[in-house]
Image (tube, grey):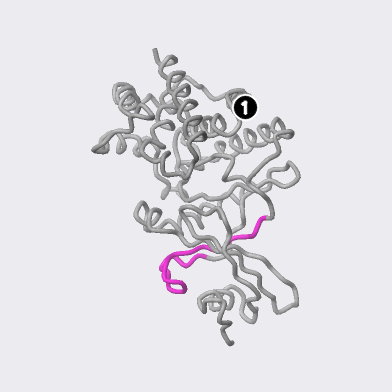
Amino acid sequence: MSTSPHIPAGFEALVERLQPGARLLTARPLEGGVSAETTLLEMARPDGGVEKLVVRRHGPRDLAANPDVARDEYRLLTVLHAAGLPVPAPHYVDEAGTLMGSPLIVIDFVDGTDTIDEAELDKGLRQMAAFLADLHRLDGSDPALAFLSDPRDQVAAALANPPDQLDDSLSEGLIRNALTSAWPPKAQHPRSVLHGDYWPGNILWRRGHLEAVIDWEDAAAGDPLADLANARLELLWWFGREAMETFTALYRQNTETDLANLPLWDLYAALRPCSKLGTWGLDTDELQAMQEQHALFVQQALSALR
């Protein structure tokens, strides 16, 4: 098989590995990937059909946090897809990075966009809450998911290793002090499967319908409030306070989860962007607006703790 000068040889070898006799038609980068490099493959199958797949190659940040991230994401997607959740079906994993020089997984291509029309926001919030509730019903203590980390350990590590310079623009010192004095919270829920970074940018929509939830490299298993808190802050940033509170109420209706510890998980969600928000390429007005919303989020959590 000859290699096109415009397509790295590794992709043609990957297509041959996926389906002997298949032919690679195109390989083009997809926008939006931050922690992983994503490429859309279009291949001609031996039966004459054309198939689209996505290759995810994990970057240095993911590999430093978890050298087995490709293998773990593949295993998790296998479980989630078998459970009927709307996630891309996994097809192949090269955990050693033998084909392209770094670990990768191959998943279904899902046609959709990560933006939702505000006219359909209420419908979208209902679907977001329903998905998260369905995800959290999966047993995170299943031995098949033993590779998933516990977010409580992540919080403990973050508190034990503060940066040399705290982010005063996001009140990092105040957040850390409040968390340190109250951590860890008493366990109130069964161990759930968690997305780890549930926000609108990791959801693909099509005509107002939630098509798939993507980017599972930060998945964990533990308190479902960790996911809820992260989604709350992101929704506040994207759509405002009313959307955040509506989503919270919808999630609560779907699960009847005890929200007593939510202020603590809200504070951890607020800690995560510290020293990072200024690196997100925001213009001055966007940055200021997000800082102000973040401050309200933190004050709400602190008031609830008191």
Check the image and report above or below for 297 versus 33.
above
Magenta stretch: helix, strand or loop mostly: loop
Left of 112 or right of it: where is 37? left
Which residue is the site of mark 1? Answer: 243
Residue located farthest toward the bottom when viewing the structure as drawn: 2
Left of 6 or right of it: where is 261? left
**Residue at x-position 51% and y-position 62%:** 105
Q: Is residue 163 in the magenta section?
A: no
* Camera-side residue of 247 and 70: 247
Instruction: Give x and y (percent) for residue 241.
Output: 58, 24
* Camera-side residue of 279 and 246: 279
**Residue at x-position 43% and y-position 19%:** 299
* Element at label 1: helix
Left of 63 or right of it: where is 49? right
Magenta stretch in the rendered image: 93-110
**Residue at x-position 65% and y-position 79%:** 23
Residue located farthest toward the left when viewing the structure as drawn: 164
* Camera-side residue of 240 and 215: 240
Instruction: Give x and y (percent) for residue 290.
Output: 49, 31
Instruction: Give x and y (percent) for residue 132.
Output: 59, 36
Q: Quadrant of residue 128?
A: top right
* Callout 1 amino acid: Ala
Residue located farthest toward the top when viewing the structure as drawn: 306
Check the image and report above or below for 278 versus 87.
above
Q: Is residue 95 in the magenta section?
A: yes
